[in-house]
Amino acid sequence: LTRWLSGCAVVWFVGCLMLLTRLSDTGSMAKGFGMLRVPRTFQRTLPRTLPRTFSRTLPKTCAKMSGKLFNLGVESKAKLRQRNNRNRRMFETAATTLPFDVQSVTKMQDTAIKAARMAGEMIKQRLGATVIQTKFNEMDLLTEVDGACQEIIEKELSKDYPNHAFLGEESVAPGADASAKATEQAINNEWVWIVDPIDGTTNFASGMPLAGVIIALAHKGEVVMGVIYDPFNDQMFHAIKGQGAYRDNQRIQVSDSKCVGESVLFTGSPPNPTAITPTLRALSYLMPRARTIRMAGSAALMFAWVADGRAGAYFEPDLNAWDAAAGSLLVREAGGQVTDMEGKEWDLLTRPVCATNHNIHSEMLEALKAVNC
């Protein structure tokens, strides 16, 4: 940028001198400029003095202008570095040696994206589907579309990767204990797909277009790829460990808000009764301190939107692995941080989740600890 600006300045300066030279040769500028005449003294002296003046002053002038532009560039770079510290966190993992083949995982991601789109088409067509039963309680709903979408996804994944294990929400009994047990068994496999076919079932069943498809891939117990598809906005969020986070083909990053007071926060309305009270305590404490708090009703979308910089944080005291696996990777790859409420890094067996843009993580944890969330 500095070199380009310096070049533009030199070209402009030389152009002005050439114009003056032309004026001295002709003595006037006619037709449309009111017969502007150059003084005779200027006409006589300019041709002789211009070369000497040009040779003496141009190097000094250019050096001064280049120096000023260079200093401006240095200052801008410093500000840019300070403002974009989150970019360092986004890229620093890329230089490390990854315990898997990125090219192979990229192909797996392509398969997951295809499966997510197939399930998403059914979700769009069947918005407002009838609830066929409740699971853990009256807040934990199931429609006939949930199972059908999971079948679509599982069939598509197993077609290309028949030896991979599969952990889907609709294949696990309701409740935190059953979820934790199924997750612990599944991650003993080298490769396991972790799927929530419709995250935001209550929204979906109520006719509200706020739901997402979640597909994550874990290798030896660690999430290495995640896909979240928002079918109603046709937005595909995806990430591979160490490769950054994307919305469709555009790289995304978390927000740059510096404190809770200038941040939008997300939380959920948990179906687990034991998680309701701590959530309400956190809401009561954070609501007057944050810019606003939203409950979107879909962990998939709230994770994706934090990764995309639309909110500063998302917290919830009780999430299943299929709710958080893809989203946690998205947020981390976008430069954010994901831990439990005590600050321990999130993994597949973690249930309480605090995902932030990193800048406000400490402040969020202090607030959540203050109310024992």
Image (cartoon, helix red, strand yellow):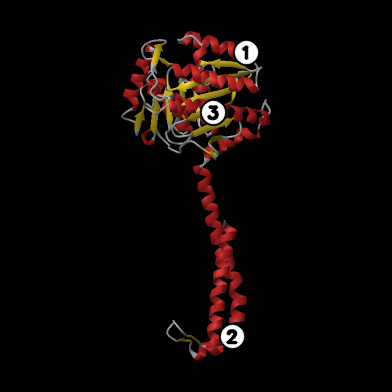
- Residue 88 percent across, percent down from the top left: 57, 38
Q: Which mark is residue 113?
A: none
- Residue 347 appears in the figure: no
**In which quadrant is the N terminus drawn?**
bottom right
Distance from Cα at disc 3 to Cα at disc 1: 22 Å
Q: Which kind of residue does numbered mark 3 sit on?
A: Val
Is tag 2's residue or tag 3's residue first in the polypeptide sequence?
Answer: 2
Distance from Cα at disc 1 to Cα at disc 2: 86 Å
Is tag 3's residue or tag 1's residue first in the polypeptide sequence?
Answer: 1
- Residue 246 percent across, percent down from the top left: 54, 36
33 is higher (above) or lower (below) than 307: below
Distance from Cα at disc 2 to Cα at disc 3: 70 Å
**Mark 3 secondary-structure assignment:** strand
1 is higher (above) or lower (below) than 59: above
**Crowding near the residue tagged with mark 1, few <14, some 14–19, many ≥20 C-alpha atoms within 10 Å:** few
Residue pictured at 60% horizontal, 27% vertical = 111
Q: Which residue is mark 3?
A: 227
Q: Which kind of residue does numbered mark 2 sit on?
A: Pro
**Mark 2 secondary-structure assignment:** helix
Camera-nearest label, 1 or 2? 1
**Mark 1 secondary-structure assignment:** loop
Q: Which mark is residue 188?
A: 1
- Residue 326 percent across, percent down from the top left: 53, 25
Q: Quadrant of residue 185?
A: top right
Q: Which residue is mark 2?
A: 47
Which of the pair 343/164 is nearer the observer? 164
**In which quadrant is the C terminus drawn?**
top left
Camera-nearest label, 2 or 3? 3
